[in-house]
Amino acid sequence: MNYVKLDIQDGIGTVEFFTEQSNSLPGEILKKLAETITEAGDNPDVKVIVLKSGGNRTFCAGASFDELIAIDSAERGKEFFMGFANVINALRKAPKFVIGRLQGKAVGGGIGLAASVDYCFASKHSAIKLSELALGIGPFVVGPAIERKMGLSAMSQMGINPDEFYDPKWAHQKGLFGKLYDDVASLDKAVNELAQKLAAYNPEAMAELKKVFWKGTDHWDELLAERAETSGRLVLSDFTRNFIQQFKNK
């Protein structure tokens, strides 16, 4: 069953999401995810946030194909992609550091989530693929977050090669991942150790430092809305609909 949940223990607010389709994200889950991240950010009992997904194989497969193919207007298209924009902005605006925990592959919007946390741990199975161009759209909404974290060159390489999975070591070298681990047990140990340390630090100092890290992004509310409108228009193309249908029929 799909879910988003928040667990608070010892100052650590763990936000976990899961869907049965490889953690791909429908609009309802995106909305709940943005709300839950904001809730954790506003809760004085939470000193640091951990973002993770359920399951063992895939961190996030991006947008739900079932919802993409059901979009029947540019307005509904923009509304769907605003789901990703709202999650990215919730991570950006949360006055607490967010640690990302990637146990497996990240595709499309999943890379956007990984790029929007403040520090990201990943397993050696966390290959990444920016697949949007193959669908007939592009990484418009997640692009600013990926470019900020990895640079325009790395984002361009992934965006132009939408069928290629990039090695976690490459993602580490480009700055997406802070550290890589051989197994999930080591990954979780590292996530917990950093979260516990941050939970003991001065919350005001961390909030001010996060503002420094995200300087120059105050316009993202408007920018990501514009990008969502572009994606919402392109997703209506015959190219996109044919691609998704062929994919689902495999």
Image (spheres, helix red, strand yellow):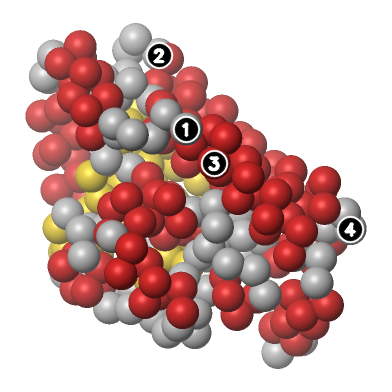
Q: Residues within 10 Å of mark 3 (few under 14, many from 20)?
A: some
Q: Earlier in the sequence, mark 2 or mark 1?
A: 2
Relative to 221, 95 lies left or right: left
Q: Amino acid at mark 3?
A: Leu
Q: Is residue 248 above or below residue 50?
A: below
Q: Nearer the viewer, mark 2 or mark 1?
A: 1
Picture quarter with the C terminus:
bottom right
Q: Are marks 1 and 3 in contact (CB under 8 Å)?
A: yes
In depth, the one of 54 and 102 nearer the eye is: 102
Cα gap from disc 1 to disc 4, whole angstroms: 29 Å
Residue at 45 percent of width and 83 percent of height: 161
Residue furthest to the right: 72
- Could you say whether the residue bearing mark 4 is in a helix, strand or loop? loop
Dividing the picture into quadrants, the one containing residue 16 is top left
Q: Nearer the viewer, mark 4 or mark 3?
A: 3
Residue at 73 percent of width and 82 percent of height: 243
- Could you say whether the residue bearing mark 2 is in a helix, strand or loop? loop
Cα gap from disc 3 to disc 2, whole angstroms: 28 Å
Cα gap from disc 2 to disc 4, whole angstroms: 38 Å
Cα gap from disc 4 to disc 3, whole angstroms: 23 Å
Residue at 62 percent of width and 64 percent of height: 21
Q: Nearer the viewer, mark 1 or mark 4?
A: 1
Q: How many marks?
A: 4
Residue 238: assigned label: none
